Image: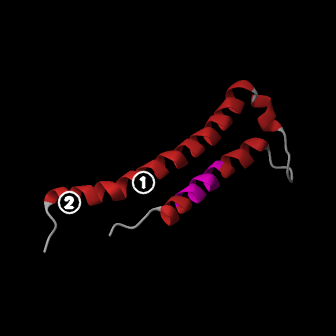
Amino acid sequence: MDKPPSDQRAAHDAHISPNSKLGLALFIVYLALYLGFMGIAAYKYELFASAPFGGVNLAILYGMSLIVAALVLALIYMMLCKPER
């Protein structure tokens, strides 16, 4: 038999709440990385001209790292989200 609507709502909330908290935490991690990039761009832009690895400047390395970080955080979210039962 189907659950009453209030039981379905409670089950849904129990599933969604941890996943939304995880998503918010991962968003904050990405936001910190992005704010670091924007902080360098705004206050120490000459630092982006440095070439720490293989002749590629820091702006390119940091920008590509942001893209990779977004993909990694999305994969982490997918692996840690609990499936709805």
Image quarter hosting the C terminus: bottom left
| Residue at 72% over, 32% down | 40
Looking at the image, residue 44 sits to the left or right of residue 13; the answer is right
| Residue at 77% over, 37% down | 48
Looking at the image, residue 37 sits to the left or right of residue 58; the answer is left
Main SS of residues in magenta: helix
**Front-lying residue, 35 or 11:** 11
Q: CA separation, marks 1 and 2? A: 18 Å
Q: Which numbered mark, 1 or 2, is in the foreground of this view?
A: 2
Q: Residue furthest bottom?
A: 1
Amino acid at the residue labelled 2: Asp
Return the residue at label 1.
18
Q: Which label was assigned to residue 10?
A: none
**Front-lying residue, 21 or 55:** 21
Q: For numbered disc 2, what is the local secondary structure?
A: helix
Looking at the image, residue 59 sits to the left or right of residue 2; the answer is right
Choose top left, top right, bottom left or bottom right for residue 36. Answer: top right
The stretch drawn in magenta includes residue 26: no
Return the residue at label 2.
7
Q: Give residue 83's position: percent from left, percent from top.
A: 39, 67
Q: Give residue 75's position: percent from left, percent from top.
A: 54, 62
Q: Residue furthest top?
A: 43
Choose top left, top right, bottom left or bottom right for residue 35. Answer: top right
Image quarter hosting the N terminus: bottom left
Amino acid at the residue labelled 1: Pro
The stretch drawn in magenta includes residue 73: yes
Q: Give residue 7's position: percent from left, percent from top.
A: 20, 60
Asked whether disc 1 touches disc 2, contact meaning CB atoms under 8 Å apart, the reply is: no
Which region is colored magenta? 66-74
| Residue at 60% over, 59% down | 72
